[in-house]
Amino acid sequence: MTILVTGAAGFIGSNLTETLLKQGETVIGLDNFNAYYDPQRKRANIANFQNHPNLRFYEQDFCNAATVQQIFSQHQPQAIAHLGAYGGVRYSIGRADLYTQVNIVGTVNLLEAARNNGVENFVFASTSSVYGHTEQIPFIETDPCNLPLAPYPASKKACEVLGYTYYNLHKMNFTALRFFSVYGPKSRPDMMPFMVTDRIVKGETIKLFDAGQMKRDWTYIDDIVSGIIAALQRPLGYEIINLGRGEPVLMADFVEIIEDLTGKQAKLDTPPAPASEPKITCANIDKARRLLDYNPQMPVVEGLTKLWAWYQADVMD
């Protein structure tokens, strides 16, 4: 199968691309290496496979509709994993125009190219952040999710809705995967697991909201990749599916695990959580188990151990 992966040099995209190539798939990678974080980290992410014979990589921007259409026309992918986006809840505040242009308009460009070229399956990376301050715990896909707390989750919710439009009008298979707190090797520097590790190592202060009494459903990258690949292989009509672990971890405990791994104590600043932050994220993964045979394997302590090993090998001088 020929699969187009957007954001192919990013955290999840590079891990997905490498796994697909190992499985013998043909991958069309697309990434514009923007400066949201150091582009050299993204180039390092793809260094091990950038010359793979089954990979064609484009350093292009999916906000350019003509470029997207040309890539689709040339390669005729059968499926797309649309992972590229501007991420980050707090970074999106005050940047609604940027998130609208990249996350919404860019996604429409890809949907249109997919429609025009007969793509069989469109898998979209959504986020647990769409649930906002829901009272339904664990988070379940039937929640209307109509009250996003920041532009980032609002943009992702908009794309989920657009996906239904393309399913309704054009019978496009569209699966939105709501990721829960993904972590692991190649992690983005702005993500909490990397940030905590990096700042503990450097002796810098970590901002830990509500003194670490918030909970997050940390999900290891390999489990997320397995869920994406299952969705790529299974056209399901229109579906929204949680990909998490279903076992939320207290942030204070999370930091303590990293302290134990690094052998250093964290310097903490513990302000109240801002309005953009829910107290807990927790995935109901019954639907993922049923439709995707999804079965997350990695416990948090083991996953953070792998993150620490990668950090020592690839990030530390």
Image (cartoon, rainbow, N blue to C red):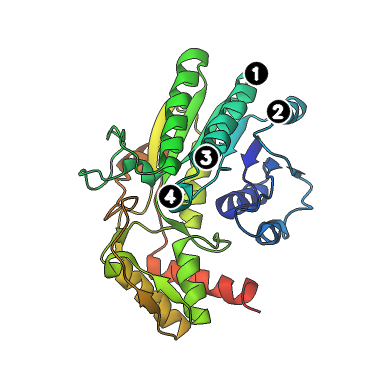
Q: Are marks 1 and 4 in contact (CB under 8 Å)?
A: no
Q: Are marks 2 and 3 in contact (CB under 8 Å)?
A: no
Residue at 29% across, 32% down: 144
Spatial distance from mark 2 to mark 3, Cα to Cα? 24 Å
Residue that carries the numbered disc 3 in the rendered image: 99
- Residue 188 picture quarter: bottom right
Earlier-in-chain disc, 3 versus 1: 3
Residue that carries the numbered disc 2 in the rendered image: 72
Tell which residue pokes out farthest to the top in this image: 169
Spatial distance from mark 3 to mark 1, Cα to Cα? 25 Å
Residue 89, disc: 4
Tell me if I can see residue 1 in this picture. Answer: no
Comparing labels 2 and 3, the label whose residue is closer to the camera: 3
Residue that carries the numbered disc 1 in the rendered image: 116
Residue at 62% across, 45% down: 7
**Left or right, residue 84 beside residue 226:** right
Q: What residue type is disc 1 on?
A: Asn
Q: What residue type is disc 3 on?
A: Tyr
Q: Secondary structure at mark 4?
A: helix
Comparing labels 1 and 4, the label whose residue is closer to the camera: 4
